[in-house]
Structure formats: structure tokens, C-alpha cells
Image (tube, rainbow, N blue to C red):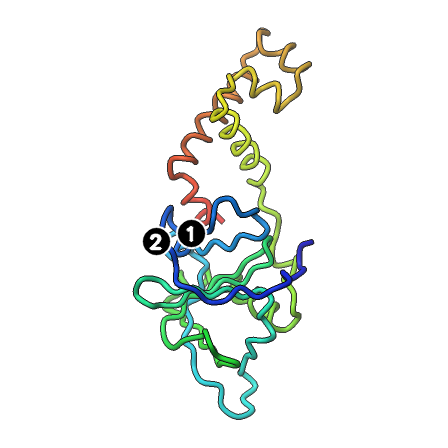
């Protein structure tokens, strides 16, 4: 269920060899709601760059990692830099630790690094999401508006899977719009259904050949 933390905290670990734009490439056989994919900053423009400071005294800015532990995954890359993902499988927040370390800490004080007007604007929404998670102990649905590209993205995934199984364009049309409509329109005077399937096939192939890396930049 969205907003429900997973039953166990996944510990910090050494990142696998990066692939496809990911700092940590998750096992492709893992179901999507339990996968924890950490995208490289080259592809995800909403990553919060963070400096980690020691927690001293009763500083109100101190964050107890126990409070966010149910959603927390920390990995290290080949340069021993830490990358942090907070996710319930449906929503995510990404942090890159540029100074200090978060792993093996009980509490920390985090400093968000802002570098300029354009980049700082991109960080406003992920920062609000992070603050809401820390305060409310849940991902705020209001800060995750529905992506209008979802339906088409799902259709492209289905088309890609069908192509790998050897399906024809006509077969794909029958699955996507129903056999009755496909039989009625495929050989009809209008080319609209055939054109739609051709576009989906083209876009699905482009997405599989690296176009998926642009999805995060288009948010």
C-alpha cells in the first residue's frame, strides 16, 4: 500500500557496477514496489546535495535516522561516496552525500547545498517532500502529483514485452484496444489505429535503447 514502509530496513552496501544511468543497479527480477534504484545525478535533476554534520546537543535541526529508517537505503559508489534513497516503493527522495557520512550514524544534522537560481528551483519540491517525510513520517500524496505520462509509459512497456515475444503489430492492437475493435478498424479506411501502434512500437524501441534515461529529466 502506498505510504506504508517496508517491514525491514535495507542496510548500506557497496554499489554494484553502474549500468543504465544508475548508481546502484537493482536486481531486475525484483518486483518494482520493493526495488530500490538509485539514479545517477546526471539523469535525476531533483537530487538534493547534502553535507552531513555531527549531531551535537539538543540542536532542533538534528535528524534521528531511526525516524526515517523504514524507508532508508544507503549505498556507496566506487569512490566511497554515499548515495541515499528514501522510498516506499511508490514515491522516492534522493540525496547525494557530498561531505560526511550518514551510514552508521544514530543522528545527524543535514545541510542542503544550493548552488544557483536554476538548480535551486529544481530542489524546492524534493526538499519539501523530504521535510514532510521527516515531520509526518509518511510520503505526502499532495507533493506527488500524478504524472500524465504514466498511461502511455505503461502502454510502451506492454508493447516492448509483446515485441520481445514476437507479436505482430496486429497482435499488439488486439491486446491494447480489444479484438473486436482491432478486427473492425485494422483493415478499415482509417489509418489511425495502425498509426497509433506504429508510434508506440517506435517509441517503445527508442525507450528500450536508452530513451528511459530522459524520463527523470522530463518531470
Residue 17 horizontal/vertical position (percent): 34, 53
Mark 1: few, some, or many residues within 10 Å (few <14, many ≥20)?
some
Residue 129 horizontal/vertical position (percent): 57, 64
Residue name at image x 62 percent, y 14 percent: 182
Residue 42 sits in which quadrant?
bottom left
Residue 22 horizontal/vertical position (percent): 40, 52
Q: Quadrant of the N terminus?
A: bottom right
Q: Secondary structure at mark 1?
A: loop
In the picture, measured across the screen, residue 90 lies left or right of residue 55, that is: right
Residue name at image x 42 percent, y 72 percent: 50
Q: Is residue 65 above or below residue 75?
A: below
Q: Tell me the tag on residue 38.
A: none
The image shows a total of numbered marks equal to 2
Residue 75 sits in which quadrant?
bottom left
Residue name at image x 36 percent, y 71 percent: 98
Residue 2 sits in which quadrant?
bottom right
State which tag comes first along the sequence, 2 or 1: 2
Check whether the beta carbons of the residues at disc 2 and disc 1 lie within 8 A of each other: yes
Q: In this orientation, which residue lies closer to the viewer: 111 or 78?
A: 78
Residue name at image x 55 percent, y 40 percent: 149
Mark 2: few, some, or many residues within 10 Å (few <14, many ≥20)?
few
Q: In this orientation, which residue lies closer to the viewer: 204 or 120?
A: 204
Which residue ends up furthest to the left in the rendered image? 79
Using the numbered discs, state the Cα–Cα distance from disc 2 to disc 1 in whole angstroms.
7 Å
In this figure, which residue is indicated by the disc labeled 1? Answer: 25
Q: Is residue 51 above or below residue 30?
A: below
Residue 83 horizontal/vertical position (percent): 42, 64
Q: Tell me the tag on residue 17.
A: 2
Amino acid at each position: 500500500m502506498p505510504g506504508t514502509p517496508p517491514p525491514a530496513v535495507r542496510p548500506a552496501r557497496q554499489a554494484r557496477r553502474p549500468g543504465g544511468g544508475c548508481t546502484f543497479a537493482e536486481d531486475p527480477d525484483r518486483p518494482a514496489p520493493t526495488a530500490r534504484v538509485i539514479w545517477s545525478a546526471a539523469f535525476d535533476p531533483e537530487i538534493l546535495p547534502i553535507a552531513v554534520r555531527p549531531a551535537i546537543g539538543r540542536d532542533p535541526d538534528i535528524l534521528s535516522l531511526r525516524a526515517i529508517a523504514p524507508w532508508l537505503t544507503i549505498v556507496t559508489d566506487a569512490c566511497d561516496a554515499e548515495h541515499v534513497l528514501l522510498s516506499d516503493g511508490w514515491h522516492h527522495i534522493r540525496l547525494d552525500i557530498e561531505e560526511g557520512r550518514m551510514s552508521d550514524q544514530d543522528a545527524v544534522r543535514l545541510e542542503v547545498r544550493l548552488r544557483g537560481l536554476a538548480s535551486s528551483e529544481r530542489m524546492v519540491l524534493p526538499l519539501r517532500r523530504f521535510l514532510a517525510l521527516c515531520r509526518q513520517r509518511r510520503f505526502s500524496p499532495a507533493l506527488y502529483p500524478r504524472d500524465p505520462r504514466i498511461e502511455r509509459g505503461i502502454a510502451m512497456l506492454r508493447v516492448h514485452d509483446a515485441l520481445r515475444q514476437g507479436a505482430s503489430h496486429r497482435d499488439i492492437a488486439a491486446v491494447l484496444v480489444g479484438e473486436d475493435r482491432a478486427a473492425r478498424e485494422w483493415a478499415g479506411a482509417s489509418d489511425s489505429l495502425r498509426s497509433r501502434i506504429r508510434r508506440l512500437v517506435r517509441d517503445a524501441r527508442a525507450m528500450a535503447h536508452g530513451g528511459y534515461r530522459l524520463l527523470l529529466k522530463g518531470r
